[in-house]
Amino acid sequence: MTSQPRAFFAVDLGSATTAAAVLGHVGGRLRLIAHTAAPASVDLDSMLIGLLAQVGRIDPEMFEELCAGDPPDIPTLVATWPRVVARTTPQRRIAVLAGSRRQRRRLEAAALRAGWLVVGGSADEDDPVALSRMVLSIETNAVLLGADHSPAGDEKRHLPDLAALVAAAAQSRPELTVVLAGGAAGYESVFAALADARSRHQPIVSSGVESGAGAFEAEPMAAESWEKAQTKLASPRTETDGEAATDEAVIDGEPPEETVAEPSDSQGPAADSLDAGQPEAEPRDAEETWAEVLVTVEPGAGEPVGAATERVAAADPADPATVDAQAAVALPFVAAEASPVFPHVLLAPDAEAGQPAGASLQQVLEGLRAFPNDSRLGVARSIASLAYVLDRSIETVEIGLQGGLWSRSEPFGEGHFTVVSSHACLADASFAPANPSEEAIDSVIAWSTAVLDRHKAMDRLNDLRLTPWGEADGEGAVFRVTAAKAAFARLIAAEPEMAANPMPELLIAAGGVFASAPPSVVALAMADLVRRHGVCHIAADGARLFGPLGVIEDESERRRLMANLADDILMPLGSLILPAGVRQGRSAGHMRLKGASSAAEIELHAGVIQVVDLPPGRAARADLDFRDAVRLGNRARHFSVDVGGGLGGLLVDLRDIPMRISDRPESRRAALEAWQRGMWPEVDE
């Protein structure tokens, strides 16, 4: 967004739900006017019409101000107001191949953090038949072949065979994208030779019309003519008056289609193409990334489609001029609709590059997997902008149907002008996985307050995936929270490095599954799983605006929007005080609240979580006196911390870090139910 619209829509197109919001300038600044959510099957325009109609009924004066003098015709406004749209990328599968088990695990970790469904194998553990089946499976969308930057003997001896296997698979499945990471990039010549061999031996295509020699029976192109044509096609195209280059970001569009090269006046009907790799080409640098562009040829202008074909077919096939002419014959179809000629190959860093290790490869794999306006990556970018605006460390947890996100951003350095960010997307962190693993089922059973066996847990997860909006109250609502906590637990288990960070100053819960739960229950879920000593504020993205605002490319504009909308976006859930080292079995000490209307002094009990009524918008100072020294940032007995109110109040969590619960199912369910009962009284009704 480069203009300053009076009002616009922010839309998050999720897999289970669609969230829409109206934002506009009111009172001299940008405000969140209204928001709603509905199942993903509901028509978007109907949602927006209903949302604007509700705004017009509740506050007609503000609605007229948003219209800025235009007639308040709601369907026209829905059709003309700008939209910032984010959408969830469907899950995709990548096959990870390596020479050793050690390297395979590193590559799998980077692919998992990038949000891929991962299936992997290594040459020292799996036979070539199993690896071939893995790559050739129709469920596989991409292949990652990687090695160390300087491969050692345990994997170096396997790389030639693996490269040949992947190249052969790419020849059978040209739609596959191949990523060569680290030392595997040195085998790019295998794929370049494959592309060159296929180009040399593939028959030169005429218009596809049967002639005396039959369709597609022209002679192969001579090597000299091929090199000449490649040089011509790879040359930069000059922009004409009718072709204006655009760098506009895709916000409200479908996922990007394959790049299609159009003919220019200077080159005739031949299409542009990147160099597909020639036999004598020097090896590229391992850090360089590139992608092949499908060659697309269109009918030539100024003559019928069959005219050029007949002219070339009548010429002498042995004449070099005829061969050159055959390369420029206009085809009556788009080549992208048929099998592409060249495999798509990307070069990427090794699995240890970047900070933290693997971040560089993760970025490449994310760009390959996700839509340009992916909502989950938009959330991560929005959190980085918000951390700069609020000047505090922030963590956010987003749980959805297609996976989960855990992101952390914090200001760094002198003046806090730099924001350090890291995030992990995990497809297995879906609250209802498509094919739940044994570990996923175990995590659901572990966090359930109801009696569930493995078969019943599997059925409940399948039902939740088929109808995410079904059973939104009663036992269904309780199971939703259970599934969300289990997904968050899998995120934490997959990212031990992020879990080792200090407690953030602000913890945000995002995603539709948290938006449908009571605020106090969401606050309890954060306290149950973020087991790090410290003090933090808890909030929720109730309007689901982080995703749409994160697709705005201009960082300065995104920060300006966050500065205006931070108070509207963040729904305060309360504050969490979580000390470590509290001795169990006796009174832990006392807490005094200053500036709150609740009890002046509260006795603290070890092993429980205590809730103090502190409403939203109310700030207080908590003085804590412990009997023994505990860790709350640092180690001491007396602390004085600032806390803020919220819909869930102030939570003082004196349970163990890490939280210890009995392994016996009955005792575990009883403990979880006791903690949840204080936050969710309706469950007893």
Image (cartoon, rainbow, N blue to C red):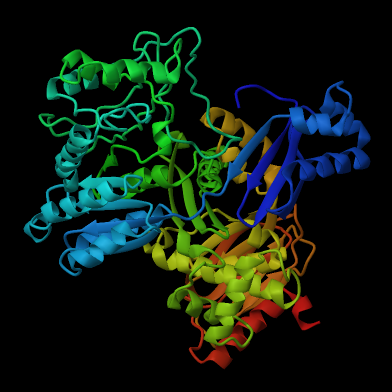
Kindly identify the residue that appears in the image at 54 percent across and 81 percent down. 445
Q: Nearer the viewer, residue 331 or 583?
A: 331
Q: Nearer the viewer, residue 420 or 149?
A: 149
- Locate the N terminus by quadrant: top right
Q: Position of residue 270 (x, y in %)?
A: 34, 19
Q: Nearer the viewer, residue 35 or 205?
A: 205
Q: Position of residue 668 (x, y in %)?
A: 56, 87
Q: Nearer the viewer, residue 324 or 383?
A: 324
Name above or below for residue 666 compared with residue 549: below
**Left or right: where 437 falls relative to 183:** right
Kindly identify the residue that appears in the image at 23 percent across and 37 percent down. 287
Write down the quadrant of residue 158 in the picture. bottom left
Name above or below for residue 438 compared with residue 106: below
**Left or right: where 237 falls relative to 395:** left
Residue 85 seen in the figure: yes
Q: Position of residue 60 (x, y in %)?
A: 92, 35
Kindly identify the residue that appears in the image at 29 percent across and 46 percent down. 178
**Left or right: where 624 falls relative to 350:** right
Name above or below for residue 273 compared with residue 109: above
